[in-house]
Image (cartoon, rainbow, N blue to C red):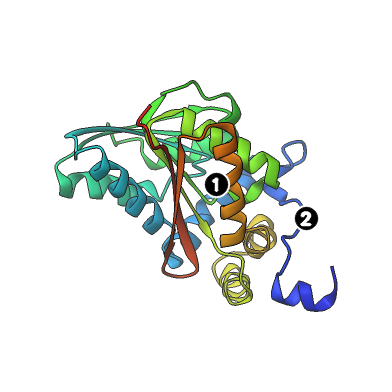
C-alpha cells in the first residue's frame, strides 16, 4: 500500500487487532479495554445503528409484543442499554442474550447487567451458532475483525441463527473517522488495546462497495437473502440481512 492509499484508506488494513490475538491477549488489561470501549461507544453513538435495525426488523415482523435478541461478539455489551430502553418505550417484552468468544468479555457483560433480569450472558462462537437461536441476531463493531471471506461466512451464520433477520452496525472506513477515533482513543484511555485497536478498527472497516459484493455473495449461497444497507450518523452504517421469503 502506498503512502497516499494509507492516508485515504482506499484499501482495508491487513494488520490484526491486538484483541484478536487470543493466544497472547487476556487478563485484566483486556477486561479494562472492554470497560474503556464503553466511552468510545458512547462518544460515537455505537448503539444507534443497532436500535435502528432492530426496530426496522421488528416492524417488518408486525411489531410483536415479545422479542428475543442475540448480541454476538458483545464485548461488555454496553450498547444494549439503548436496546433495553427501546423495548420499554415500545412496550416489548425483550429477552436479550449477550455472547462473546472470550471469557473476559463475558465477565464484563455479566458485571454490567448483573441486576438486569432481561439479560443473560453466554460464551459462544459466532461460527457455531445454532439455527433460529433468536428472533434477531445483532453484531456491533464485529464484522471488521474478519477478512472478506470470513465476513460473508459470519453474515451467513448470523442470518441462519435468526428467525427474523440480523443487524450489523459498524464504522465506515474514512480518513475523518480514523482521525476522530485516533484522537478520542488517546483522550479516553491509556489502555494499549484501545489506543492500538481503536483507529485500526476504522482502517479495517468496510465501505458501500464491499457491502454490494457481500450481498451478491450471500445471494449466491441463497437467492432468498436480502441485504439492506443504510448510512447512519457519525460515519456509521446499519446493515440488515434477512430472507426475503421469510424462511
Asked if 33 appears above or below 124 in the picture, the reply is: below
Indicate the secondary structure of the residue bearing disc 2. loop
Q: Which mark is residue 1?
A: none
Q: Which mark is residue 215?
A: 1
Residue 27, position as x, y percentages in the image: 65, 40
Q: Image check: 93 left or right of 227?
A: left
Can the viewer see residue 26?
no
Residue 76, position as x, y percentages in the image: 48, 44
Please identify the residue farthest to the left as the structure is shown. Answer: 91
Quadrant assignment for the C terminus: top left
How many C-alpha atoms fall within 10 Å of the one at disc 2: few (<14), some, or many (≥20)?
A: few
- Mark 1 and mark 2: Cα distance apart in space: 22 Å
- Identify which residue, 212 or 234, lies in the foreground: 212
Residue 112, position as x, y percentages in the image: 40, 42
The tag earlier along the polypeptide, 1 or 2, is 2
Seen at 47% across and 56% down, the residue is 38
Indicate the secondary structure of the residue bearing disc 1. helix
Quadrant assignment for the N terminus: bottom right
* Residue underneath mark 2: 14
Please identify the residue farthest to the top as the structure is shown. Answer: 130
Give the tally of numbered discs.
Answer: 2
Q: Image check: 220 left or right of 203?
A: left
- Identify which residue, 224 or 121, lies in the foreground: 224
Seen at 61% across and 40% down, the residue is 152
Q: Nearer the viewer, mark 1 or mark 2?
A: 1
Amino acid at each position: 500500500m502506498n503512502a497516499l492509499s494509507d492516508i485515504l484508506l482506499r484499501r482495508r488494513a491487513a494488520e490484526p487487532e491486538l484483541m484478536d490475538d487470543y493466544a497472547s491477549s487476556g487478563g485484566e488489561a483486556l477486561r479494562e479495554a472492554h470497560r474503556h470501549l464503553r466511552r468510545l461507544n458512547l462518544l460515537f453513538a455505537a448503539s444507534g445503528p443497532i436500535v435502528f435495525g432492530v426496530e426496522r426488523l421488528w416492524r417488518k415482523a408486525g411489531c410483536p409484543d415479545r422479542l428475543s435478541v442475540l448480541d454476538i461478539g458483545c464485548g461488555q455489551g454496553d450498547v444494549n442499554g439503548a436496546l433495553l430502553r427501546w423495548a420499554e418505550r415500545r412496550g416489548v417484552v425483550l429477552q436479550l442474550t449477550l455472547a462473546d468468544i472470550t471469557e473476559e468479555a463475558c465477565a464484563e457483560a455479566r458485571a454490567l447487567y448483573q441486576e438486569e433480569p432481561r439479560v443473560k450472558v453466554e460464551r459462544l462462537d459466532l461460527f457455531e451458532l445454532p439455527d433460529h437461536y433468536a428472533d434477531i441476531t445483532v453484531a456491533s463493531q464485529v464484522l471488521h475483525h474478519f477478512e472478506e471471506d470470513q465476513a460473508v461466512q459470519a453474515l451467513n451464520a448470523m442470518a441462519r441463527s435468526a428467525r427474523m433477520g440480523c443487524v450489523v452496525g459498524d464504522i465506515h472506513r474514512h480518513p475523518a473517522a480514523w482521525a476522530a477515533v485516533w484522537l478520542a482513543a488517546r483522550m479516553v484511555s491509556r489502555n494499549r488495546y484501545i489506543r492500538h485497536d481503536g483507529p485500526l478498527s476504522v482502517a479495517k472497516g468496510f465501505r458501500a462497495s464491499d457491502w454490494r459484493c457481500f450481498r451478491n455473495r450471500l445471494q449466491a449461497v441463497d437467492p432468498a437473502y436480502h441485504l439492506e444497507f443504510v448510512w447512519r450518523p457519525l460515519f456509521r452504517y446499519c446493515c440488515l440481512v434477512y430472507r426475503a421469503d421469510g424462511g
